[in-house]
Image (tube, rainbow, N blue to C red):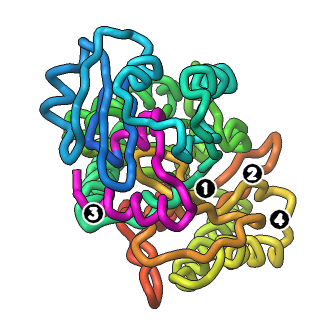
Amino acid sequence: MNSDRLKRLRAELERFDLDAMLLRYASNLRYISGYSGSNGLALVTRDAAFFLTDFRYKTQAQQEVSQMQVRVPVEADLFAALAEQGVLKASMVCGFEGNRLSYESYVHLEQLFPGTEFRDASMLMETLASVKEESEIRDIRQAAAISDKAFLELLNEIKPGISERRLDAKLSYIMKSLGSERDSFDTIVASGVNGAKPHHKPGDKLLRKGEFVTIDFGAMVNGYHADVTRTVCLGNADEKQKEIYAIVLQAQQRALDGIRAGISGKEADALARDLIAQKGYTEYFGHGLGHGLGYEIHAEPRLSPKYEEKLQVNQVVTVEPGIYIPDWGGVRIEDDVVIKEKGCLVLSAAPKTLLEL
């Protein structure tokens, strides 16, 4: 774990007038401590940092956690174990992950620490983690490269008669064979009319000649996600398919040409949305243009009509416009990019010209 992350978090504690930050959510824990297990707790104060886990993860925590004092209490309740450590004082103001912590856990904390003021610090960690270090960008780049290579190999398997579910399984196998830790998320394989559903779950439907097939997938490297979508046609595309595909590709390229640090997520979204609207397909593009990537598949920042925050250098986002027409199908094209001062750097490189297989 890069020690600069603790320094940056402590700067946020000072900025928000907090004495400490309590972390429980897995991705936030991994970001601040390096720990990749499923049960842990961290408390970061302005001059110390503590990490608690249970016996199952003792060795793992000792290997992965740096810059923190590791405790492995007998007490299974990590909040109660934290109370026994005596490091969170009654006079302290402690931030917590209000967007992640259950109400039951919050009540439990107040009972264990009656004199401590717990203050909602929702999105503090997510915002902190949104600006990527070079090592993080390298991992996402590698995950994207695996995804690209896997897609090229999968093209040999995309044939009439294969089911969506089988194609999904083949892609997962290929990505893992190429070095992916696991799939970044449940892969989407949507053929024919199923392409009208942006988050279609692969089923038993067989691919047929003349259909679009949309594949949304990603590899994972060191916990970092890639997220790529390509749409191909089985056989020759008809005129409407060519039209829709060309609009989506043009919309994505317009966004890629215009995205840069300093514009808002709303402005980035409009780059693609306005073009799709001009072509008469406003109602068929109903999701945001993109989202951040990191230890989470959907992270900060967002590219959407409601996101007013400015994009920052070295944030990593997806750019994924689409058109989805009920009872016809859909097209989505998605790449992963790094925000730069005067543009963006595209990490994924699978071909985007309309492939007619």
Q: Amino acid at mark 2?
A: Tyr
The dot on residue 332 is 1
Determine the image quadrant of residue 51: top left
Q: Position of residue 172 (x, y in %)?
A: 35, 32
Which range of residues does the magenta coloring cover? 1-30
Alpha carbons under labels 2 and 3: distance apart: 43 Å
Judge by depth and name the residue closer to the eye, 346 or 312: 312
Tell me the tag on residue 4: 3
Which circle marks residue 324 in the picture?
2
Compared to residue 150, the image places residue 113 above or below, namely above
Q: Secondary structure at mark 3?
A: helix
Q: Nearer the viewer, mark 4 or mark 3?
A: 3
Distance between the Cα atoms at labels 4 and 2?
9 Å
Q: Is residue 29 above or below residue 10?
A: above
The residue that label 4 is drawn on is: 281
Residue at image point 50% right, 24% down? 165
Q: Horizontal placement of 185 versus 174: left or right? A: right
**Separation of residues labelled 1 and 4 (CA atoms):** 13 Å
Look at the numbered discs 2 and 3 and tell me whether their residues touch, using CB distance below 8 Å.
no
